[in-house]
Image (tube, rainbow, N blue to C red):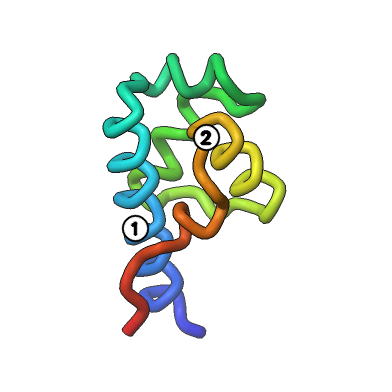
Amino acid sequence: MGKDFSQDYLKKFGKNLKNLREIKGYSLRGLAAECKIDHSDIGKMERGEKNITLLTVLELASALQVHPKKLLDFDVE
């Protein structure tokens, strides 16, 4: 898996995360207040600049009150 390939997935995940956050009505700081993740790290995730762990996916899903698979629901080509 090359860097460009990985970066594409990080950006797709980030776009999905941002969309879910906005649907729930959270600002970056608002979402950060609901979980144990700094708002600057959430911003990096949304821009596809930060690779994350499964535990981070679970933390975000809990804060957004969605199933974790919802965060990973993006096109894979």
Q: Is residue 54 above or below residue 60?
A: below
Residue 8 x, y percent position in the rendering: 34, 68
User: In what element is the residue under mark 1?
Assistant: helix
Residue 17 x, y percent position in the rendering: 39, 45
Q: Amino acid at mark 1?
A: Lys
Q: What whole-number distance in Å separates the C-alpha atoms at marks 2 and 1?
A: 22 Å
The one of 55 and 7 positioned closer to us in this rendering:
55
Residue 10 x, y percent position in the rendering: 42, 60
The one of 67 and 18 positioned closer to us in this rendering:
67
Residue depicted at x 35% and y 28%: 24
Residue beneath label 1, please? Answer: 11
Looking at the image, is mark 2 or mark 1 earlier in the sequence? 1
The one of 64 and 39 positioned closer to us in this rendering:
64
Residue depicted at x 40% and y 67%: 9
Say whether residue 70 is left or right of residue 4. Answer: right
Residue beneath label 2, please? Answer: 65
Residue 59 x, y percent position in the rendering: 64, 38
Q: Is residue 73 above or below residue 18?
A: below
The one of 14 and 25 positioned closer to us in this rendering:
25
Q: Is residue 52 above or below residue 2?
A: above
User: In what element is the residue under mark 2?
Assistant: loop
Dividing the picture into quadrants, the one containing residue 43 is top left
Residue 47, disc: none
Q: Amino acid at mark 2?
A: Gln
Tag 2: Cα neighbours inside 10 Å, few (<14), some, or many (≥20)? few
Residue depicted at x 60% and y 28%: 37
Say whether residue 15 is left or right of residue 51. Answer: left
